[in-house]
Amino acid sequence: MYTFLANIPELIKKLGFTNLQQEKQEDYLLRLKEIISCRINVAVLERLSEDNHTYFISLVEQGRNEDALIYVRNEISDLDDLVKKVTKETIEDFLSLRKN
């Protein structure tokens, strides 16, 4: 739905992936992107009513991702801020786990 990981070189440095092979970096970033995407979906569903859940999920299941995005944008006025917040929190969680 989104490109959450805009500044990939900076993110690789921040996450401590600079010493990894390119293939490993890409693998870890793909996994991180999947985790962020799942968390965004949960955050979106938490903001929608039950009827809106059903409609949104039906759009996604039909492969109508652009329609689903338009629908969510209309229902959640601060969607961009929500995406940024979830992305930031997920990266911070990852860094926190890495330190422990």
Image (spheres, grey):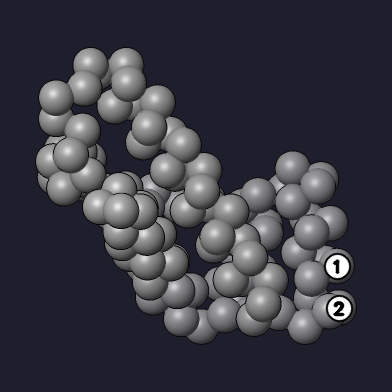
Q: Answer yes or no: do the residues labelled 2 and 1 have beta carbons within 8 Å? A: yes
Look at label 2 and name its amino acid. Answer: Asp
Q: Which residue is mark 2?
A: 51
Which residue shows up at 81% across the image and 45% down it? 62
* x and y percentages locating residue 60 in the rendered image: 74, 51
Q: Is residue 34 left or right of residue 70?
A: left
Q: Secondary structure at mark 1?
A: helix
Q: Secondary structure at mark 2?
A: helix
Q: Is residue 79 left or right of residue 41?
A: left
Up-down relation of residue 11 to residue 68 (above or below):
above
Which residue shows up at 14% across the image and 30% down it? 18
Based on the displayed image, in which of its 4 quarters is residue 51 positioned?
A: bottom right
Q: Is residue 100 left or right of residue 76?
A: left
Look at label 1 and name its amino acid. Answer: Thr
Which residue shows up at 54% across the image and 62% down it? 40
Q: Is residue 21 left or right of residue 57?
A: left
Which residue shows up at 61% across the image and 61% down it? 41
Based on the displayed image, in which of its 4 quarters is residue 45 positioned?
A: bottom right
Task: Depth check: give the residue in front, 36 or 66.
Answer: 36
Of the numbered discs in the image, which one, if any, rests on residue 65?
none
Q: Residue furthest front?
A: 100
* x and y percentages locating residue 36 in the rendered image: 47, 53
Are there few (<14), some (14-19), or many (20+) residues within 10 Å of tag 1? few
Q: Which residue is mark 1?
A: 54
